[in-house]
Amino acid sequence: MSASATLRVGIDLVSVDEVADSVRHFGDRYVTRIYTSHEIDSCRAEMGHGDAGAPGPSDVSEAYAIGSLAARFAAKEAVMKVLRPIGVQLDWRTIEIHRMTGGWCEIRLSGRAATMAVEAGIEELSVSLTHEASMAGAVVVGRCKDTYPSKGREEA
Amino acid sequence: MTVDETIRQVLADHGRLAVPVDTLADDADLFGAGMTSHASVNVMLALEDAFEFEFSEKMLKKSTFESIEAIRTGVLEMTGE
């Protein structure tokens, strides 16, 4: 790492049961307001329900790998902690947890989230996801140029 | 139900608050009362169901959901009342 770089870290935990409740209660409306189409496909494919013509699940929450959805929500929150928005709620879909062919994930930003990253001098983001039966979590590290504007860095 | 009663019912059902919603003043900080970001998404969707509208992008900020008072302002703006 360059001596002139600084790091930002974000971490978040999400209850898997709470995400399951949300999917059950609000269905695809919840899913499509939070997740990109890539994320939805990634979480469907893990359950093996992505095949055309396959019988649909009886419970909408069974259509998704809920732990994976929860981990992605945690990752989006962790990215927000790295971006440090003030008074702004970013569209969740502008932070995409992109699953690579090898199985690991990368973060892809768009819209306002991408603009905020540029403004903060964040050159690179790295994410790690995990989930167990009840909880999902994510850690995000952002590497920033040390020369980014000092706005928001002042002590309270 | 009045607008305020509906908002309080939505918070009771979806806000996952650490304290009973009827103990909260209209200007109490809901995030300080235990509402997580994830719960605030559920509150947003439940408000849309209850009042039959969809929050506009400019309304989707943390401050819209920070208190019952703020939610009321947002709901009334969206419903044009």
Image: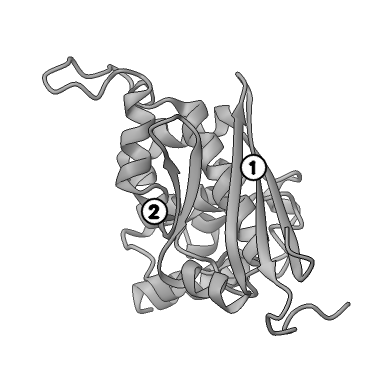
Tell me the number on the disc at residue B16: 1
**Image vertical order of residue B24 relative to residue A41, above or below:** below
- State the image quarter where residue A148 is shown: bottom right
The quarter of the rendered structure image containing the N terminus of chain A is: bottom right
User: Is disc 1 surrounded by few (<14), some (14 to 19) or many (20+) residues within 10 Å?
Assistant: many
What residue is drawn where x is 76% and y is 71%? Answer: A4
Please say if the residues under marks 2 and 1 sit with CB atoms less than 8 Å apart.
no
Q: Mark 1 lies on which chain?
A: B
Q: Can residue A130 be seen in this view?
A: yes
Left or right of A57 in this view: A140: right
Tell me the number on the disc at residue A124: none
The residue furthest right is: A155
In the depicted view, which residue is nearer to us: B62 or B80?
B62
Left or right of A39 in this view: B4: right
Query: What number of labels is visible?
Result: 2
**Image vertical order of residue A46 relative to residue B5, above or below:** above
Q: Earlier in the sequence, mark 2 or mark 1?
A: 1
What residue is drawn where x is 41% and y is 34%? Answer: A23
In the depicted view, which residue is nearer to us: A88 or B60?
A88
Type of the residue with mark 1: Arg
